[in-house]
Image (cartoon, rainbow, N blue to C red):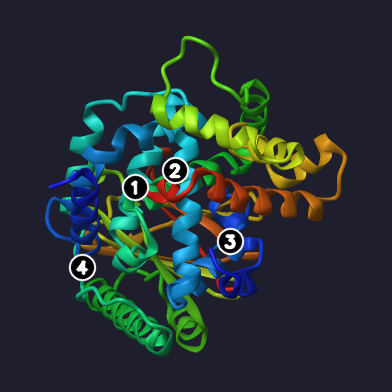
């Protein structure tokens, strides 16, 4: 079976809540999910974040259908949103802002990334975006900044930032091509 | 990505995938996509782009214990109904079944607690039960720390805000309930019961965003509450 075929089979098993499907999904995507969570909340809190997000999804069979798209992409969104929600609690807001200020849009030289080939493709695709869309996306995704924080930092209205983010993501989908949603 | 789908949710779909929407708006996107094939496909496409961006993040190796922990937690999950793909035309059916189930669970647990411990004051007193019966509410299953097993709990919460009821199976003595309302933590008392089942009811100054059960200041179960817009 091809890798894509294995992913599709796993997605079907996961949606049907077949025994062992959650563990199999974690084995397949766990490293990427943990990396995403660690990027937002730090490595210390990433374990709880991944655990809670996956269990929450697993408990709600209606939350994922294979028609939605790739299971790995869906789980990545769930984990990242769980991590962002965790950082938005009152007690951790200042820590998040401090952490956001430390994060750089690009990974420093010498640091291993999740997927070198994909990372290069992402960098090329991002470089093709109009600068204002690229900057907004990088701040939102890599620096985990809120819409308001981005608007404030760039000195533009909140509505403009929303539009730039949405347009940027749509355009990025086009730049990445069909492979962009195969993960 | 198609224009038809874009008309439904506008920019909110991309903002949702980026994790930039508040819980209410995020729940609205999820609810709409669940019954709209074109928006569901567009959502999956946007999620694919985000997953690709993750390729450029620093790689982190998860702790080995996480796989075991996840397996243990998953083993405790019980599915009450077979999975069925919701369509727009029957999207309300699962919700109605869920409400009926929650009603039965609420009354069952409350009545059982009353019968078992008549000498104790039940948390779900007549006023609390009347509030639940005449109100519109949602429910959420609490995510339980595996170390607290076999604890299991659900939260019933008013859709308009104002109250929560926590129903607990196998509560430990001294289990405290905390809710977060408008970013502020509120102590909602302790779970009452006979050790087999327990409950707690609290009126709140608004919509609870999160509910936690704590034992000796340690969080043993939690739920994030989502509201319809």
In the picture of the structure, the residue carrying the numbered disc 1 is: A72
In the picture of the structure, the residue carrying the numbered disc 2 is: B51
Crowdedness near tag 2: few (<14), some (14–19) or many (≥20) residues, C-alpha within 10 Å: many
Mark carried by residue B79: 4
Image mark 2: chain: B
Query: Where is residue A179 drawn, in percent x and y?
Result: 41, 46
In the picture of the structure, the residue carrying the numbered disc 3 is: B13
| Of residues B64 and B226, the one drawn nearer to the viewer in this rendering | B64
Which secondary structure, mark 1?
helix
Q: Are marks 2 and 1 in contact (CB under 8 Å)?
A: yes
Which secondary structure, mark 4?
loop
Question: From the viewer's perspective, is the residue at label 1 or at label 4 nearer?
Answer: 1
| The C terminus of chain B sits in image quarter | bottom right
Gap in angstroms between the C-alphas marked 3 and 2: 15 Å
Residue B213 is at least partly visible in this image: no
Image mark 1: chain: A
Instruction: Tell me if A7 is positioned left or right of B15 in this view.
Output: left
């Amino acid at each position: 079976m091809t890798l894509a075929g294995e992913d599709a089979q796993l997605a079907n098993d996961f949606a049907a809540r077949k025994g062992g499907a959650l563990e199999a999904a974690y084995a397949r995507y766990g490293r990427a999910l943990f990396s995403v969570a660690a990027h937002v909340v730090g490595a210390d809190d990433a374990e709880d974040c991944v655990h809670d997000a996956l269990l929450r999804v697993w408990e709600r069979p209606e939350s994922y259908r294979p028609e939605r798209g790739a299971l790995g992409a869906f789980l990545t969104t769930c984990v990242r949103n769980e991590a962002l929600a965790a950082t938005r609690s009152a007690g951790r807001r200042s820590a998040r802002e401090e952490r956001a200020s430390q994060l750089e849009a690009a990974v420093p030289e010498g640091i291993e990334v999740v997927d070198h080939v994909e990372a290069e493709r992402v960098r090329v695709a991002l470089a093709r975006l109009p600068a204002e869309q690229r900057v907004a996306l990088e701040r939102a995704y890599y620096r985990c900044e809120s819409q308001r924080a981005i608007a404030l930092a760039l000195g533009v209205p909140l509505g403009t930032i929303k539009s730039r983010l949405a347009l940027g993501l749509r355009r990025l989908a086009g730049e990445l091509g069909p492979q962009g949603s195969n993960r | 990505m198609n224009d038809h789908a874009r008309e439904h949710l506008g920019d909110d779909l991309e903002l949702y995938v980026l994790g930039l929407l508040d819980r209410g708006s995020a729940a609205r996107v999820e609810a709409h996509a669940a019954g709209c094939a074109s928006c569901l496909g567009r959502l999956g496409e946007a999620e694919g782009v985000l997953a690709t961006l993750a390729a450029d993040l620093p790689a982190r190796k998860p702790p080995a214990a996480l796989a075991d922990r996840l397996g243990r937690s998953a083993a405790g999950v019980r599915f009450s109904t077979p999975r069925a793909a919701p369509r727009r035309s029957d999207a309300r059916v699962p919700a109605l079944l869920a409400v009926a189930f929650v009603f039965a669970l609420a009354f069952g647990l409350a009545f059982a607690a009353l019968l078992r411990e008549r000498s104790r004051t039940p948390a779900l007193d007549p006023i609390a039960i009347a509030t639940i019966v005449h109100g519109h509410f949602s429910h959420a299953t609490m995510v339980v720390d595996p170390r607290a097993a076999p604890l299991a709990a659900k939260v019933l919460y008013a859709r308009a805000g104002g109250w929560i009821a926590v129903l607990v199976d196998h509560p430990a003595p001294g289990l405290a309930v905390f809710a977060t309302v408008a970013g502020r933590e509120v102590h909602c008392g302790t779970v009452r019961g006979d050790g087999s089942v327990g409950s707690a009811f609290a009126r709140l100054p608004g919509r609870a965003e999160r509910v936690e059960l704590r034992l000796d200041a340690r969080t043993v179960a939690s739920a994030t509450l989502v509201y319809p817009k």
